[in-house]
Image (cartoon, grey):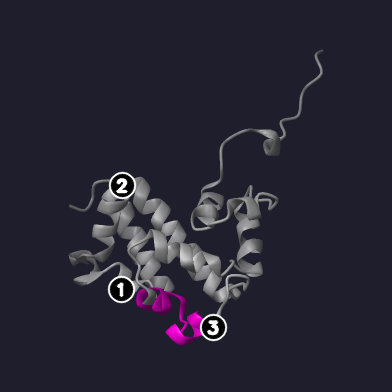
């Protein structure tokens, strides 16, 4: 009888986990995070608990349609508090969680719509399915993120026009 081989899932090259892809989406200096292990969703939880670098805030402001005021609402930080941080600082876990949720939404939106401009137009436009509010205006709560993600799912599968 032939020796059986044991399949080691960790050694399979199955691409990057969606959670890790979202975690790295707004990280400006990827070289700084090259040594960090991000293979599974559980790795992302550890990184959120450790906190995102504050430079991520600048990356969001420079690469998205999210204004400084909108981001302060999403992160539950006043504009004054945001101005006190330096690039070397690390966001607390709560704010890091909201940054991660925003990055997940961006990754999903870009995958759904195919390009940044179309997704951002959708993000800013009032949606009948969201009570004529924009998805961006709801992102200060976890329920708002859930509703925006649910709506993206409906669009992705053709249940919303």
- CA separation in Å, label 3 and label 2: 34 Å
Residue at image x 69%, y 39%?
A: 10
Question: Which badge, 1 or 2, comes first in the chain's sequence?
Answer: 2
Residue 76 higher or lower than 134, as above or below: below
Q: Which residue is mark 1?
A: 137
Query: Which residue occupies the foreground of this view, 13 or 2?
Result: 13
From the viewer's perspective, is 85 left or right of 107? right
For the residues bearing labels 3 and 2, Cβ distance under 8 angstroms: no
Which stretch appears magenta? 69-83
- CA separation in Å, label 1 and label 3: 24 Å
Query: Which residue occupies the foreground of this view, 43 or 60?
Result: 60
From the viewer's perspective, is 61 left or right of 17? left
From the viewer's perspective, is 138 left or right of 81? left
Secondary structure mostly taken by the magenta-highlighted segment of the chain = helix
State yes or no: residue 71 in magenta.
yes
Task: Categorize mark 2 by other alpha carbons within 10 Å: few (<14), some (14-19), many (20+).
Answer: few
Write down the quadrant of residue 150 in the picture.
bottom left
Residue 3 higher or lower than 153, as above or below: above
Q: Which residue is mark 3?
A: 84
Mark 3 vs mark 2: give the one in front: 3
- CA separation in Å, label 1 and label 2: 21 Å
Mark 1 vs mark 2: give the one in front: 2
Q: Position of residue 22 (x, y in %)?
A: 50, 54
Q: Position of residue 82 (x, y in %)?
A: 49, 80
Mark 2 residue element = loop
């Amino acid at each position: 009888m032939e020796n059986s081989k044991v399949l080691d899932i960790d050694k399979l090259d199955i691409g990057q986990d969606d959670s890790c892809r979202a975690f790295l989406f707004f990280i400006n200096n990827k070289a700084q995070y090259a040594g960090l292990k991000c293979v599974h969703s559980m790795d992302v939880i550890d990184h959120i608990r450790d906190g995102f670098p504050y430079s991520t805030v600048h990356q969001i402001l420079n690469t998205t349609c999210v204004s400084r005021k909108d981001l302060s609402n999403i992160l539950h930080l006043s504009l004054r508090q945001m101005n006190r941080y330096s690039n070397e600082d690390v966001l607390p876990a709560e704010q890091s969680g909201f940054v991660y949720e925003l990055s997940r939404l961006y990754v999903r939106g870009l995958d759904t719509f195919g390009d940044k401009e179309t997704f951002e137009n959708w993000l800013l436009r009032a949606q009948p399915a969201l009570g004529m509010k924009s998805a961006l205006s709801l992102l200060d709560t976890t329920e708002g993120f859930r509703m925006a993600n649910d709506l993206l799912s409906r669009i992705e599968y053709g249940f919303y026009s």
